[in-house]
Image (cartoon, rainbow, N blue to C red):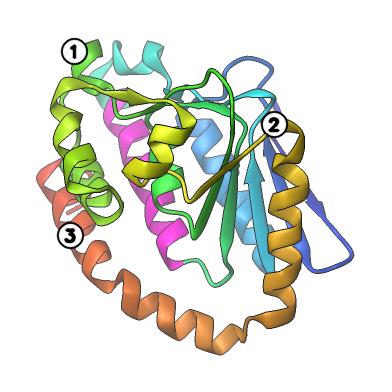
Amino acid sequence: MTTRTTLEILEDGIASIILDDGKVNAMSTEMLAEIGAQLDKASEAAEIIVLSGREGIFSAGFDLAVLGGDQKEKQEMVAAGFRLVEKFLTHPQPIIVACTGHAYPMGAFLMLSSDIRIGALGNWRMGLNEVAIKLTVPHFALELARHRLTPPAFAQITTATMFGPEAACRAGYLDEVVSTEKLLPCVFERAANLVKTLDRDSYIGTKARLSAKVLSAIRAGAQKDGLID
């Protein structure tokens, strides 16, 4: 089986999951399932999870070949994307995304459902560009975007606006941007501080309260999309 992700449990209680399919980290059904499985493994052995892509790309989003093919396979892939977003929003450990480059949907969805999002400065673009590739944004994704983005950035989903790192930070896709060489050191320093300062039970309880409204909204959206009963 092709390995698209790598999991490493570090000594300081941090789990590192790296996405690298050798290409653009297209979010196929298999890739999405693999990320979910790595999160499950990490939850048993770590306190904080860092998710990063390969240099220059976090993810090009859903696999376009599947989106343009068989309707059943397309629906299965989008459903897998919804399930992974749900897993991120309910995960018992903080998830920090190191956005190493371009982040198109579904990559942007993962950023929007993470606890902390730090991006590398550079000629990258991120956002929800479905309208430009003849797709309608899923209901669940719109509710997730509404939860994170500023109202002006949310409104620009209709015109498939893609943002550079600094503009993405202002829009709500990212919390912080740093130089490429500082990205991973910054992310792992943040993770190490969280290991020292966060109380696990308090984190879980607070995250559940903060996420309750968006979880309800995205689940209702997934029903409208026909992804769940």
Q: Give the range drawn in magenta.
A: 74-90
- Asked if residue 76 is positioned above or below residue 89 in the image, the reply reads above
Front residue of 58 and 216: 58
Front residue of 83 and 208: 208
What type is the residue that disc 3 sits on?
Ala
Which of the 4 image quarters holds residue 162? top left
Q: Quadrant of the N terminus?
A: top right
Q: Name the residue under label 1.
A: 134
Front residue of 125 and 4: 125
- Residue 127 is a magenta residue: no
Identity of the residue drawn at 70% across and 39% down: 18
Which is nearer the N-term, disc 2 or disc 3? 2
Query: Image check: 85 left or right of 70?
Result: right
Badge 3, how many Cα within 10 Å: few under 14, some, many 20+? many
Q: How far apart are marks 3 and 1 (CA)?
A: 24 Å
Q: Name the residue under label 3.
A: 217
Q: Distance between the residues labelled 1 and 2?
A: 32 Å
Which is nearer the N-term, disc 1 or disc 2? 1
Identity of the residue drawn at 74% across and 57% down: 15
- Kindly give the residue lying farthest to the left in the view shown: 224
Residue 13 is situated, as x and y percent measured from the top left of the image, at 79, 68
Residue 36 is situated, as x and y percent measured from the top left of the image, at 55, 50
Q: Mark 2 points at which residue?
A: 180
What type is the residue that disc 1 sits on?
Lys
Query: Image check: 12 left or right of 25?
Result: right
Front residue of 45 and 128: 128
Q: What element carries label 1?
A: loop
Query: Image check: 32 left or right of 219?
Result: right
Q: What element carries label 2?
A: helix
Q: Distance between the residues labelled 2 and 3?
A: 35 Å
